[in-house]
Amino acid sequence: MPTPYTIIGTPFSTFTRSITLGLTHKKIPFTQVRCVPHSDTAYDNHPFGFLPTLIIHEIHGKTVNLKLRESAAIARYIDKVVPEPSLHISPGHGKAIIEEQMWEFVSLAGAHGFPAVEKGVVKPRVAATDAGQLTDSEIREQIKPAVAHLKRLLGKMEELMADEGYVFGSKLSWADFFLFPLLADLKAIPEGELLSPRMLNWMEEMNKLEAVKATTPGTLSVGARPP
């Protein structure tokens, strides 16, 4: 039986994983087409070749095969069609005073966390390690400015988090699902030493989730590389 949704994107993609975490947590069946950014398949489904794209095959029983792009838009659609279990917060969860602070955190993770973690540190470290031409100390020297920037960013993100539990305390939310793939990648390389005790405790809580376990294959944390 065909699934109602198809997700376009490799498990290695952090934004793709944010969405598959949400789909899996909400027990929404989906098919995954594994491709890298800027591949022919990516461009066939996203005007700029980015990941992920959610293909919505039916709406109210009518075939539409609608391509929905951009992770925040996809997350909002998922919440609309399957509201429970909720991945939203309420005032009083963690340090939240208004509900929109969850989306603020999601945006910060995407707009600032992704370039600092992935472009600045993870991708250069993995590329240099795989090439096998530089020593660890030489790699560290190459990415030293990016690591310093990342350390500052992680401190700022941690300031927004509750003192314990998930990002917003006892309530699991999209904030967790957008931050986790980034830090799971970071933890898989030597620069994971930047992660504070608070961040490591949070990751331990996240690793207990069935959605996290189900979306781990194909990621850097288990030694995978893009297809």
Image: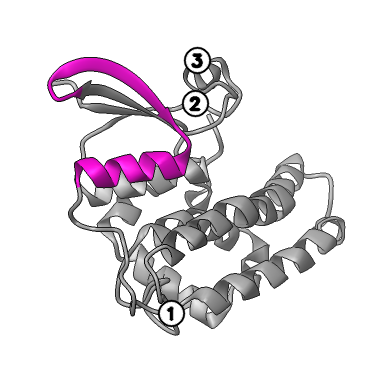
Residue in view at x 50 percent, y 62 percent? 105
Give the label on residue 35, or none: 2
Name the amino acid, label 2: Cys
- What is the CA distance from the residue labelled 2 to the residue labelled 3? 11 Å
**Where, by quadrant of the figure, is residue 191 drawn?**
bottom right
Residue 207 percent location from the top left of the image: 36, 64
In the rendered structure, which disc, 2 or 1, sits on the residue that comes first in sequence? 2
Task: Name the residue beneath numbered marker 3.
Answer: 44
Q: How is the image coloured?
A: one colour
- What is the CA distance from the residue labelled 2 to the residue labelled 1? 37 Å
Quarter of the picture holding the N terminus: top left
Name the amino acid, label 1: Lys
Q: Nearer the viewer, mark 2 or mark 3?
A: 3
Mark 2 neighbour density, 10 Å: few (under 14) some (14–19) many (20 or more): many
Which is nearer the eye, 3 or 93? 93
In the image, residue 218 sits, relative to residue 145, either above or below, namely above
Residue 85 percent location from the top left of the image: 19, 57
Q: Nearer the viewer, mark 2 or mark 1?
A: 1
Residue 43 percent location from the top left of the image: 55, 18
Residue in view at x 44 percent, y 77 percent? 201
Q: Are marks 2 and 3 in contact (CB under 8 Å)?
A: no
**Secondary structure under badge 1?**
loop
**Where, by quadrant of the figure, is residue 147 drawn?**
bottom right
Mark 1 neighbour density, 10 Å: few (under 14) some (14–19) many (20 or more): some
Q: Are marks 2 and 1 in contact (CB under 8 Å)?
A: no
**Secondary structure under badge 3?**
helix
Q: Which residues make up the magenta segment?
A: 59-82
- Residue 173 visible in rendering: yes
Task: Name the residue beneath numbered marker 1.
Answer: 95
Residue in view at x 63 percent, y 59 percent? 189
In the rendered structure, which disc, 2 or 3, sits on the residue that comes first in sequence? 2
Name the amino acid, label 3: Asp
